[in-house]
Image: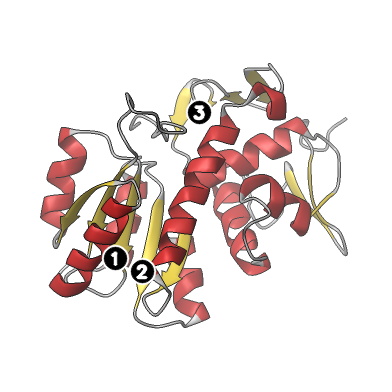
Protein backbone atom coordinates (compact mmCIF):
# COMPACT_ATOMS: atom_id res chain seq x y z
CA UNK A 1 0.00 0.00 0.00
CA UNK A 2 1.32 3.42 -0.91
CA UNK A 3 2.08 5.73 1.98
CA UNK A 4 -0.73 8.19 2.84
CA UNK A 5 -0.29 11.77 1.72
CA UNK A 6 -0.54 14.52 4.31
CA UNK A 7 -0.87 18.25 3.83
CA UNK A 8 1.81 19.94 5.86
CA UNK A 9 -0.58 22.27 7.63
CA UNK A 10 -0.43 26.04 7.91
CA UNK A 11 2.77 27.39 6.40
CA UNK A 12 5.46 29.28 8.27
CA UNK A 13 8.74 30.71 7.02
CA UNK A 14 10.49 27.45 7.95
CA UNK A 15 7.97 25.11 6.30
CA UNK A 16 7.81 23.92 2.72
CA UNK A 17 4.60 24.94 0.94
CA UNK A 18 2.08 22.30 -0.18
CA UNK A 19 3.46 20.44 -3.20
CA UNK A 20 1.13 20.03 -6.16
CA UNK A 21 1.43 18.32 -9.55
CA UNK A 22 -0.44 19.86 -12.48
CA UNK A 23 -0.88 17.39 -15.36
CA UNK A 24 -2.37 18.93 -18.50
CA UNK A 25 -1.45 18.67 -22.19
CA UNK A 26 -2.38 22.33 -22.83
CA UNK A 27 0.95 24.16 -22.50
CA UNK A 28 -0.62 27.61 -22.11
CA UNK A 29 -3.05 26.52 -19.40
CA UNK A 30 -0.36 24.47 -17.68
CA UNK A 31 1.95 27.48 -17.52
CA UNK A 32 -0.83 29.77 -16.29
CA UNK A 33 -1.82 27.37 -13.52
CA UNK A 34 1.79 26.92 -12.44
CA UNK A 35 2.28 30.69 -12.14
CA UNK A 36 -1.04 31.27 -10.38
CA UNK A 37 -0.61 28.46 -7.87
CA UNK A 38 2.99 29.45 -7.20
CA UNK A 39 1.88 33.03 -6.55
CA UNK A 40 -0.66 31.64 -4.06
CA UNK A 41 1.82 29.70 -1.97
CA UNK A 42 2.06 26.31 -3.68
CA UNK A 43 5.14 24.50 -4.92
CA UNK A 44 4.20 23.25 -8.39
CA UNK A 45 5.46 20.64 -10.83
CA UNK A 46 3.71 21.19 -14.19
CA UNK A 47 3.88 18.22 -16.57
CA UNK A 48 2.15 16.93 -19.70
CA UNK A 49 2.25 13.12 -19.62
CA UNK A 50 1.43 10.10 -17.49
CA UNK A 51 5.02 8.93 -17.80
CA UNK A 52 6.28 12.11 -16.14
CA UNK A 53 3.67 11.71 -13.42
CA UNK A 54 4.76 8.16 -12.65
CA UNK A 55 8.39 9.24 -12.35
CA UNK A 56 7.52 12.10 -10.00
CA UNK A 57 5.37 9.94 -7.72
CA UNK A 58 8.05 7.28 -7.52
CA UNK A 59 10.69 9.85 -6.65
CA UNK A 60 9.06 12.00 -3.97
CA UNK A 61 5.76 12.67 -2.16
CA UNK A 62 3.27 15.29 -3.30
CA UNK A 63 0.20 16.69 -1.58
CA UNK A 64 -2.25 16.88 -4.49
CA UNK A 65 -2.64 16.15 -8.19
CA UNK A 66 -4.52 18.48 -10.53
CA UNK A 67 -5.39 16.19 -13.44
CA UNK A 68 -6.81 17.01 -16.88
CA UNK A 69 -9.65 14.70 -17.88
CA UNK A 70 -9.18 14.80 -21.67
CA UNK A 71 -5.63 14.18 -22.86
CA UNK A 72 -4.03 12.32 -25.77
CA UNK A 73 -2.60 8.94 -24.88
CA UNK A 74 -3.60 7.89 -21.38
CA UNK A 75 -6.45 10.19 -20.34
CA UNK A 76 -7.27 11.48 -16.90
CA UNK A 77 -9.87 8.82 -16.09
CA UNK A 78 -7.46 6.02 -16.94
CA UNK A 79 -4.68 7.64 -14.90
CA UNK A 80 -6.98 8.13 -11.92
CA UNK A 81 -8.24 4.55 -12.06
CA UNK A 82 -4.70 3.18 -12.38
CA UNK A 83 -3.37 5.23 -9.46
CA UNK A 84 -6.18 4.11 -7.17
CA UNK A 85 -5.81 0.48 -8.24
CA UNK A 86 -2.11 0.65 -7.33
CA UNK A 87 -2.89 2.00 -3.85
CA UNK A 88 -1.99 5.65 -4.47
CA UNK A 89 -3.96 7.86 -2.07
CA UNK A 90 -2.79 11.29 -3.24
CA UNK A 91 -5.77 13.69 -3.37
CA UNK A 92 -6.86 14.18 -6.99
CA UNK A 93 -8.71 17.20 -8.36
CA UNK A 94 -9.89 16.56 -11.91
CA UNK A 95 -10.11 19.33 -14.53
CA UNK A 96 -12.27 19.12 -17.64
CA UNK A 97 -13.17 21.36 -20.55
CA UNK A 98 -16.78 20.21 -20.16
CA UNK A 99 -19.11 20.87 -17.27
CA UNK A 100 -21.07 17.65 -17.81
CA UNK A 101 -22.28 16.17 -14.53
CA UNK A 102 -21.82 12.69 -16.02
CA UNK A 103 -18.10 13.38 -16.44
CA UNK A 104 -17.94 14.56 -12.84
CA UNK A 105 -19.62 11.44 -11.51
CA UNK A 106 -17.44 9.13 -13.61
CA UNK A 107 -14.33 10.94 -12.37
CA UNK A 108 -15.43 10.50 -8.77
CA UNK A 109 -16.20 6.84 -9.39
CA UNK A 110 -12.66 6.38 -10.71
CA UNK A 111 -11.30 7.79 -7.44
CA UNK A 112 -11.03 11.55 -7.88
CA UNK A 113 -11.60 13.60 -4.72
CA UNK A 114 -12.95 16.68 -6.47
CA UNK A 115 -13.85 18.03 -9.90
CA UNK A 116 -13.62 21.47 -11.51
CA UNK A 117 -14.52 22.72 -15.02
CA UNK A 118 -11.70 24.54 -16.81
CA UNK A 119 -14.05 27.49 -17.27
CA UNK A 120 -13.85 28.15 -13.52
CA UNK A 121 -11.83 31.06 -12.18
CA UNK A 122 -8.27 30.11 -11.14
CA UNK A 123 -9.05 31.34 -7.64
CA UNK A 124 -11.66 28.56 -7.41
CA UNK A 125 -8.89 26.02 -7.98
CA UNK A 126 -6.89 27.63 -5.18
CA UNK A 127 -9.95 27.51 -2.93
CA UNK A 128 -10.48 23.81 -3.65
CA UNK A 129 -6.83 22.94 -2.99
CA UNK A 130 -6.85 24.95 0.23
CA UNK A 131 -10.03 23.13 1.27
CA UNK A 132 -8.21 19.84 0.72
CA UNK A 133 -5.48 21.12 3.02
CA UNK A 134 -7.98 22.12 5.70
CA UNK A 135 -9.57 18.67 5.54
CA UNK A 136 -6.18 17.07 6.06
CA UNK A 137 -5.55 19.31 9.07
CA UNK A 138 -8.96 18.33 10.45
CA UNK A 139 -8.12 14.64 10.05
CA UNK A 140 -5.33 14.95 12.59
CA UNK A 141 -7.16 17.20 15.05
CA UNK A 142 -7.94 15.50 18.39
CA UNK A 143 -10.26 18.42 19.18
CA UNK A 144 -12.50 17.33 16.31
CA UNK A 145 -12.12 13.58 16.47
CA UNK A 146 -11.00 12.66 19.99
CA UNK A 147 -8.09 10.44 20.93
CA UNK A 148 -9.25 6.98 19.82
CA UNK A 149 -6.60 5.89 17.34
CA UNK A 150 -7.88 2.41 16.48
CA UNK A 151 -11.45 1.41 15.69
CA UNK A 152 -12.53 -2.15 14.97
CA UNK A 153 -15.68 -3.32 13.21
CA UNK A 154 -16.29 -6.81 11.87
CA UNK A 155 -13.00 -8.10 10.41
CA UNK A 156 -11.75 -4.52 9.89
CA UNK A 157 -9.31 -2.37 11.85
CA UNK A 158 -9.22 1.37 11.15
CA UNK A 159 -5.97 2.95 12.35
CA UNK A 160 -6.60 6.68 12.66
CA UNK A 161 -3.03 7.85 13.21
CA UNK A 162 -1.73 5.84 10.24
CA UNK A 163 -4.77 6.56 8.05
CA UNK A 164 -4.97 2.86 7.28
CA UNK A 165 -7.73 0.27 6.99
CA UNK A 166 -6.98 -3.44 7.33
CA UNK A 167 -9.10 -6.53 6.90
CA UNK A 168 -7.71 -9.56 8.70
CA UNK A 169 -4.27 -7.94 8.63
CA UNK A 170 -4.36 -7.04 4.92
CA UNK A 171 -4.22 -3.34 4.00
CA UNK A 172 -7.08 -1.87 2.00
CA UNK A 173 -6.12 1.33 0.13
CA UNK A 174 -8.42 4.27 0.83
CA UNK A 175 -8.48 7.65 -0.82
CA UNK A 176 -8.43 10.62 1.54
CA UNK A 177 -12.14 11.20 0.99
CA UNK A 178 -12.96 7.55 1.67
CA UNK A 179 -10.88 7.62 4.84
CA UNK A 180 -12.61 10.78 6.05
CA UNK A 181 -16.04 9.30 5.42
CA UNK A 182 -15.18 6.08 7.23
CA UNK A 183 -13.74 8.03 10.13
CA UNK A 184 -16.92 10.09 10.46
CA UNK A 185 -19.01 6.92 10.38
CA UNK A 186 -16.80 5.14 12.93
CA UNK A 187 -17.02 8.13 15.29
CA UNK A 188 -20.83 8.08 15.09
CA UNK A 189 -21.97 4.44 15.29
CA UNK A 190 -25.69 3.74 14.86
CA UNK A 191 -26.42 7.42 14.39
CA UNK A 192 -28.41 8.34 11.27
CA UNK A 193 -26.61 11.20 9.53
CA UNK A 194 -27.92 13.43 6.79
CA UNK A 195 -26.01 14.13 3.60
CA UNK A 196 -25.62 17.75 4.69
CA UNK A 197 -24.03 16.65 7.97
CA UNK A 198 -21.63 14.30 6.19
CA UNK A 199 -20.86 17.00 3.64
CA UNK A 200 -19.93 19.45 6.39
CA UNK A 201 -17.76 16.86 8.13
CA UNK A 202 -15.74 15.70 5.13
CA UNK A 203 -15.70 18.75 2.87
CA UNK A 204 -16.46 21.69 5.12
CA UNK A 205 -19.08 24.39 5.07
CA UNK A 206 -17.22 26.31 2.37
CA UNK A 207 -18.20 23.64 -0.16
CA UNK A 208 -21.42 23.64 -2.14
CA UNK A 209 -23.65 20.66 -1.48
CA UNK A 210 -23.09 17.87 -4.01
CA UNK A 211 -25.33 15.03 -2.83
CA UNK A 212 -24.67 12.85 -5.86
CA UNK A 213 -20.91 13.22 -5.43
CA UNK A 214 -21.21 12.14 -1.80
CA UNK A 215 -23.27 9.13 -2.85
CA UNK A 216 -20.56 8.16 -5.33
CA UNK A 217 -17.87 8.29 -2.64
CA UNK A 218 -20.00 6.19 -0.29
CA UNK A 219 -20.60 3.70 -3.10
CA UNK A 220 -16.84 3.39 -3.60
CA UNK A 221 -16.33 2.88 0.13
CA UNK A 222 -19.02 0.21 0.27
CA UNK A 223 -17.28 -1.73 -2.50
CA UNK A 224 -14.22 -1.91 -0.26
CA UNK A 225 -15.83 -2.99 3.01
CA UNK A 226 -19.10 -4.72 2.17
CA UNK A 227 -19.31 -8.37 1.14
CA UNK A 228 -22.34 -7.40 -0.94
CA UNK A 229 -22.38 -3.64 -1.71
CA UNK A 230 -25.95 -3.99 -3.00
CA UNK A 231 -27.05 -5.17 0.46
CA UNK A 232 -24.73 -3.23 2.79
CA UNK A 233 -24.39 -4.28 6.42
CA UNK A 234 -22.03 -1.58 7.72
CA UNK A 235 -22.98 1.60 5.83
CA UNK A 236 -26.74 1.53 5.57
CA UNK A 237 -29.08 3.86 3.75
CA UNK A 238 -31.69 5.45 6.00
CA UNK A 239 -34.43 6.48 3.63
CA UNK A 240 -35.46 10.10 3.98
CA UNK A 241 -32.47 10.84 6.22
CA UNK A 242 -29.12 9.74 4.82
CA UNK A 243 -26.79 7.03 6.10
CA UNK A 244 -26.02 5.11 9.28
CA UNK A 245 -22.94 3.08 10.30
CA UNK A 246 -23.55 -0.23 12.10
CA UNK A 247 -20.16 -1.52 13.30
CA UNK A 248 -21.52 -4.97 14.21
CA UNK A 249 -22.93 -5.44 10.73
CA UNK A 250 -26.44 -5.39 12.13
CA UNK A 251 -25.94 -8.61 14.10
CA UNK A 252 -26.46 -7.16 17.58
Q: Quadrant of residue 171?
A: top left
From the viewer's perspective, tell me whether residue 194 is left or right of residue 212: right
Q: Which residue lies at the image location 51% right of the left edge and 70% below the top edge?
A: 105
Q: Which residue lies at the image location 54% right of the left edge and 33% below the top edge?
A: 137
Q: Which residue lies at the image location 18% right of the left edge and 56% below the top edge?
A: 46
Does 21 appear above or below 116?
A: above
In this orientation, which residue lies closer to the viewer: 57 or 189? 57
* Residue on which the image places disc 3: 163
Give the crowd class for mark 3: few <14, some 14-19, many >=20 residues within 10 Å.
Answer: many
* Residue on which the image places disc 1: 76
Secondary-structure class at tag 1: helix
From the viewer's perspective, tell me whether residue 29 is left or right of residue 184: left
Residue 113 visible? The answer is no
Q: Are marks 1 and 2 in contact (CB under 8 Å)?
A: yes
Give the crowd class for mark 1: few <14, some 14-19, many >=20 residues within 10 Å.
Answer: many
Does 114 appear above or below 233?
A: below
In percent of width and height, residue 64 lies at 35, 47
In this orientation, which residue lies closer to the viewer: 62 or 103? 62
Of badges 2 and 3, nearer the viewer stands 2
Q: How is the image coloured?
A: secondary structure
Secondary-structure class at tag 2: strand
In percent of width and height, residue 81 lies at 34, 57
Q: CA distance from mark 1 to mark 2?
A: 9 Å
Does 188 appear above or below 243?
A: above
Callout count = 3
* Residue on which the image places disc 2: 95
Q: Which residue lies at the image location 16% right of the left edge and 42% below the top edge?
A: 56
Amino acid sequence: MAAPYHWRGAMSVNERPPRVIVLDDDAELRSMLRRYLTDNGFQVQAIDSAEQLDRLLQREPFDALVLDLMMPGEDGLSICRRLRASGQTIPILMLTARGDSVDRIIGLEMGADDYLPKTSEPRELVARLNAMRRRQQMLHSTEVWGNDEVTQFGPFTLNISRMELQRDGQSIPLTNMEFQLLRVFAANPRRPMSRDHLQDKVKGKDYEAMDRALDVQISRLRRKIEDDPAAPRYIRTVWGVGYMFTPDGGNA
